[in-house]
Amino acid sequence: MIRLEDTSGGAVAAAIAAERHRMGSPATGMVLTLLILSDEETQADATAAAVHAARQHPMRIVTLIPRASSKPSRIDAEVSVGGDDGPGEVAVIRLRGDRAEHANSVAIPLLLSDTPVIAYWPHESPDVPDADPIGRHAQRRITDAATAEDPVGELRRRRDGYRPGDTDLTWTRLTPWRTVLASMLDRPYGHITSASVHAEDGNPSALLLKLWLHHTLKVPVSLEVSTAPGISEVRLTTPEGDLVAARDGEAEGHLSRPGFPDARIAIHRRNLAELLSEELRRLDPDELFGEVLKLVPDA
Amino acid sequence: MSRIRPEHRLENPLRSTLDQRVPRVAGPCGIVLFGVTGDLSRKKVMPAIYDLANRGLLPPGFALVGFARRDWEDEDFAQLVHDSVREHSRTPFREEVWKQLSEGIRFVEGDLGDADAYARLKGVVDDLDATRGTGGNHAFYLSIPPGLFPVVLENLKASGLAEDHPDRWRRVVIEKPFGHDLESAIALNDLVDSVFPPGAVFRIDHYLGKETVQNILAVRFANTMFEPLWNAHYVDNVQITMAEDIGIAGRAGYYDGIGAARDVIQNHLLQLLALTAMEEPLTLTPGDVRIEKEKVLRAVTLPREIGKHSSRGQYAEGWQGGLPVRGYLEEDGVSPESATETYAAMRVDIDNRRWAGVPFYLRTGKRLGRRVTEVAVVFKRAPHLPFSESMIQELGNNAFVFRIQPDEGITVRFGSKVPNTTTGQVRDVNMDFQYGESFVDSSPEAYERLILDVLLGDPPLFPRREEVEIAWQILDPVLDYWADHGRPEQYASGGWGPESSYDMIARDGRMWRRP
């Protein structure tokens, strides 16, 4: 790792290139640039997750940490290229004092030419990510409403500020559930009359799951409070009986449907790296997310 | 208000073409595995099944039935699967996934020729349908020597296990070799077709499941800058290489009598040739791609004098990478008289407008310099070079290389000025694109992809009967010629093949690329 003190965006880019050169491979195969906007508290986890995801999506990771209250006003950076963690390039940049307002000007020289840019706010995010100076570079903008104090309120804010290309990890977390439910309906299932989602109180993913089910099945879907962490059960009611997908423990669950013995399923909660990997797989707008987000009701 | 329009809807309301995330999961089904203790089963098939389960791509209630002549209970077979998964799976081992999978594991003991055993198998399969909800959908995976196919297929038919039914499917998966010449391939295909309808036969050529092989079509047909050069105007020759650094590694029983050409050229290399040389298909649907592949394979011709344009050899005792290695004829289980080739190279031509006059050189061998598979499109020299002779002495032909494995990616080779030399010399440089996935355990392995496609009933990556038979038609005259003319030449282990392979390409005024 290289430390750069009192530096600039251009100098960081030059340091990455020099390090690449020193390693004997100046040509890079990076497929995208990921800009992470974070505070000190979340930056380490977010960067580590991105580094992990870079094993699947070789990329340049630029973590920008604005620290307006830190003096003197200057930019410090840590740069690492390649290594045991994966092939990616990582720059963690602290913007102190008045520099905190100018993350965008630091980011510009660090964007890889002519490849996609993704922006990720692991914690606090702007009202309209697409209108944010950093977000404007990005064709996909990742937020995480679950980290807010009022996650469901945050989803409303996401809804109001939504532009195509926005995505939120509360939606990403649902993919295993949605996959299990979709595969349940790959088999003949009768007529679904209503459905319910059981989850801990105020779980934003559970709300999105409810809205998605309502949107696709066109039946009333209720949201029931349960004590288990996260989402614990989804129930689709038919005249012949209920189709149920349930989580029984940390990573296990079962499916039951009328006329068949229960089947065990594995449904583990994925870590941040896995979520980011999923996000980076497709870089075009997630229209379905946009549709579902629109249905988030007012308080 | 909603933009999810009716036309986006599939039959399942929870599946939508707008959905970027929910993967296609195989419907209710199971696999019946014949040849459970073989290398392929343990190292590839079982781990791939686990990895699919781990990725959530297998249906709940999925079943895996082993069939073998062993005095085993379900648990013994489950243990075998468990051990091979622990040793060879690519994704992390997770107890809960294993529990889900192991609940559906069954074992049927019996001889491959024993009708009663198939009756028991049918009982087990029916029971799974009732208790696990496999829905009558089963794939029979024949991971057994092809000599045993007839007895298994006949019994599957006689027992009613292969029976076609409108609301369920039965499929069969077979591995290469698909016969040992055209005649035997036709016989095998006739046999398989007599038991299963053509759409239910999945021939696994695991190369076609590789991301990099699929990428050949993407690179050719999604870009503008390569295809204009992809013809006889600009291409001098194409070299398709699959080299292994290992010997036959204890597989004498399989390999001896088969040899490099049947083992590799007939399937992998001719498939790579087809993808490299085919015309643009109307669409990338399986039917359209096959039409083009078959068309270009039909246009393949052999040189008139096969002896001058082909080469074969056997690796000799020697040194490889600094270690002493045995020669082929000294390997356990190989007759000292064996005439089986461990190296095969041949020139073919493609008789169409695009490729007239462009030789395609195919080569494969064991105990070569390093393990590498690649397709190299070697371009002609520029028609005029405004440099002095000394400046371009070191300049070779431009080349575009699909690196299939290892180190998957693309290399482009072109001339560039050497900096700081007073002479201004122009020399070859390589530009590399690395496939990120190459070092990632999380990208699906070829077998995963193919097994999932079998269960989804998605056939684009499986060679059809016609392709197999055309490939034999191409290869048979070479095999016949070799059978009648002498023996394979000994070649030094750890190098790039016999002298005759250098001679055959030098005769055309060309050189092998060092892969």
Image (cartoon, grey):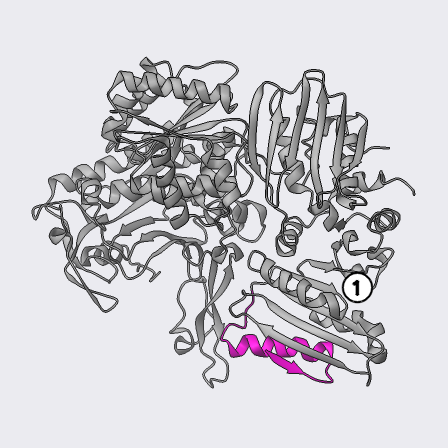
- Given the image, on which type of amino acid does mark 1 rest? Ile
Q: On the picture, is B271 further left or further right than B340?
A: right
In the rendered view, does B308 fall on the left or right side of A121? left
Residue located 71% across and 18% down the image: A191
Residue B481, horizontal then vertical, whole percent: 17, 39
Q: Residue drawn 86% across and 55% down?
A: A128
Tell which residue pokes out farthest to the right in this image: A299
Q: Which residues are magenta?
A: A1-28
Q: Is residue A112 visible to us here?
A: no
A20 or A233: nearer the viewer = A233
The percent position of residue B426, horizontal first and vertical second, equals: 45, 74
Q: Chain of mark 1?
A: A
- Magenta stretch encompasses residue A13: yes
Tell me: residue B225, above or below residue B171: below
- Residue placed under numbered mark 1 in the picture: A134
Quick check: can you spot residue A167?
A: yes
Give the x, y percent position of residue A215.
Answer: 79, 31
